[in-house]
Image (spheres, grey):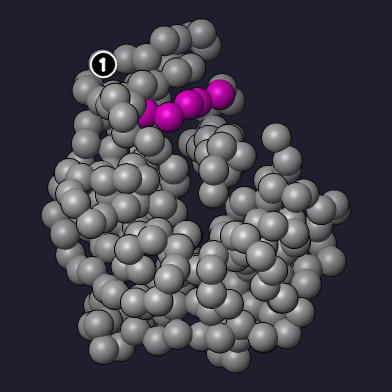
Amino acid sequence: MYAARRLFLLLTVTTLVGLGASAAVATPTSTHGSRTHGSLPSTIQLPDGFQPEGIAIARDGTFYVGSIPTGAVFSGDVRTGRGEVVVQGREGRAAIGLKVDRRGRLFVAGGPTGMAFVYDARSGTPLASYQLTTAQTFINDVVVTPTAAWFTDSLNQVLYRVPIGRHGKLGRQRDVTTLPLTGDLQFQAGFNTNGIDAARGGRVLVIVQTNTGLLFTVDPRTGVTRRSTSAARRSPTATASCCAAAPCTWCRTSST
């Protein structure tokens, strides 16, 4: 998830909120960025040294951007460009991929920390943290389904599952499980699994392999992967995947 992923997701912002104009990433205070399309900001500045990576968008148009080196999260309004740091950075944390669920919780992939974090999306209050692995790792992205949050690991051929119970109750540390990935996916040197999404109510997962540009479906019950034939072409720097619509159509980043 690097520049190509951010570009892809920023374009997704425009689609989700129906703005019809390009948006860039985020402001350190409640001030506007530069504007070119009527009253919509075309550029939104982040705090100095923020080093953004993943971005997530809530249904109301609130965006969340994570900081790679500190784990801070900046939140703002894509329509106005106004925002602030809602999760303060701290030593030993990182924020890579992010997702907001319908209960207003922000799930964050912790990169080399091997951890996952959950915050109240509005206040930034920590709700839970999980040590997914203690091995060498890069927890890269996350998708939230009705029954679990799934995290990718770019260095290990597995997914991590944090269960979500009745009424959205988050699982405990001891409930976290590791799902080995088998089937068509073959890990190679470098960064492997990266972006992740879900379809059919979480009964199918979709992952992208960065260093091959290939998409795979995953059976979350068994970990068996199948190479997707829906991708029109390969991209050697593919860094994100998304479920566009039922029954199963996938969109992806292209090389930039």
Q: Is residue 169 above or below residue 120?
A: below
Residue 232 located left or right of residue 13: right
Q: Is residue 24 above or below residue 57?
A: above
Residue 40 in the image: x percent, y percent?
44, 17
Residue 137 located left or right of residue 169: right
- Residue at 33% in and 63% down: 113
Residue 127 in the image: x percent, y percent?
18, 65
Quadrant location of residue 227? bottom right
- Residue at 40% in and 86% down: 177
Q: Determine crowd level at label 1: few under 14, some 14-19, many 20+ residues with C-alpha closer than 10 A.
A: some
- Residue at 23% in and 69% down: 129
Q: Quadrant of the C terminus?
A: top right
Q: How many numbered marks have been drawn onto this rendered protein structure? A: 1
Q: Main secondary structure of the magenta part?
A: loop
Q: Is residue 70 above or below residue 147?
A: above
Residue with the mark numbered 1? 31
Residue 122 in the image: x percent, y percent?
21, 47
Q: Nearer the viewer, residue 103 or 93?
A: 93
- Residue at 26% in and 16% down: 31
Residue 6 located left or right of residue 41: right
Q: Is residue 194 above or below residue 76?
A: below
Query: The disc labelled 1 sits on which kind of residue?
Result: Thr
Residue segment shown in magenta: 22-26
Q: Secondary structure at mark 1?
A: loop
Q: Nearer the viewer, residue 115 or 242?
A: 115
Magenta highlight on residue 25: yes
Q: Nearer the viewer, residue 79 or 117?
A: 117
